[in-house]
Amino acid sequence: MANTSQPVRRTALLAGGLAVLGLLSACGSENGTPPPSHSARASDAAPSAGTATDPGTAAAAGTPSDTAGSASASARTDGRCHTSELRAAVGRLDPGAGQRNFPLVLTNTSERTCTVYGYPGAAFVDASGRQLGPDPERAPGSPETLTLTPGASAWAGLSFSSPEISGARTATPAALLVTPPDERASLKVEWTAGAVPVGGKASSVSVTALEAGSGP
């Protein structure tokens, strides 16, 4: 009789355990989906791909480059050579058939590269600074923009008929005032080449457009 009751008791306990498990399973089904696992929670916490490419973020990233561009634009300066950056000189006489020709040389004495374009102004003056004769005429030509690095030069030809041949009225200047293109201030160069025509027949003086170099 004792041997028969022990298997029955074990069977009853097993049946009770299964019943409890069944009740727990049922409760889980009634409460819905189980809580998310650790890996699911980590995925939910990570920023979305859209956040990395948010338009506001992209615009903020572009701001420094825009600012740099503005700074670069504001830093640009006038590329023209100014009178204060140049030195003027009158080169050696180059005589022709009844003509007297001189190179007017402009040299960049600054520490920056600048440009010149067109015709220089020129005027003969006496010791008191009074102009002698009319302004030179511009000889026909095709001006080009010339880039002068520090120490580089450009030249223009100053020409007039020999007064001894033309019979023009003459005067002997103390200096020649040379004005760089598009500038108002002039450079004063001592004139040592004698008399120049200032009036009368064949008294015109001409100047050419600037070319690269220091003369022929």
Image (tube, rainbow, N blue to C red):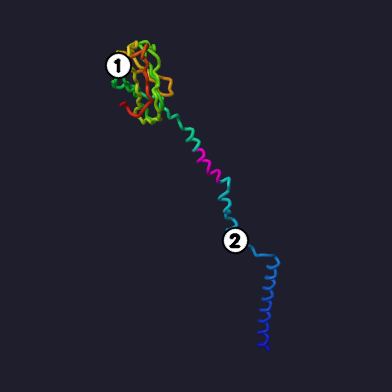
Looking at the figure, which quarter contains the C terminus?
top left
User: Which SS type dominates the magenta stretch?
Assistant: helix
The amino acid on which the numbered mark 1 sits, given as a three-letter code, is Ala
Q: Estimate the x, y position of residue 205 in percent, counting from the top left.
A: 36, 17
Please state the extent of the stretch shown in magenta in the rendering.
Answer: 58-68
Q: Residue at x 60, y 59 (%)?
A: 41
Residue 60 lies in the magenta-colored region: yes
Mark 1: secondary structure: loop
Mark 2: secondary structure: helix
Q: Residue at x 46, y 32 (%)?
A: 76
The amino acid on which the numbered mark 2 sits, given as a three-letter code, is Ala
Foreground pick, 83 / 203: 203
Q: Indicate which label's residue lies in the foreground, 2 or 1.
A: 1
Residue linked to disc 1: 193
- Residue occupying the far right of the picture: 30
Looking at the figure, which quarter contains the N terminus?
bottom right
Q: Estimate the x, y position of residue 130 in percent, counting from the top left.
A: 39, 11
Q: Estimate the x, y position of residue 88 in percent, counting from the top left.
A: 35, 22
Which picture quadrant has residue 100?
A: top left
Q: CA distance from mark 2 to mark 1?
A: 98 Å
Q: Residues within 10 Å of mark 2 (few under 14, many from 20)?
A: few
Q: Estimate the x, y position of residue 56 in percent, counting from the top left.
A: 58, 45
Residue linked to disc 2: 40
Q: For this view, does 55 lie left or right of residue 175? A: right
Residue 100 lies in the magenta-colored region: no
Q: Are marks 2 and 1 in contact (CB under 8 Å)?
A: no
Which picture quadrant has residue 189?
A: top left
Q: For this view, does 37 lie left or right of residue 143? A: right
Instruction: Answer above or below: position of 86 versus 61.
Output: above
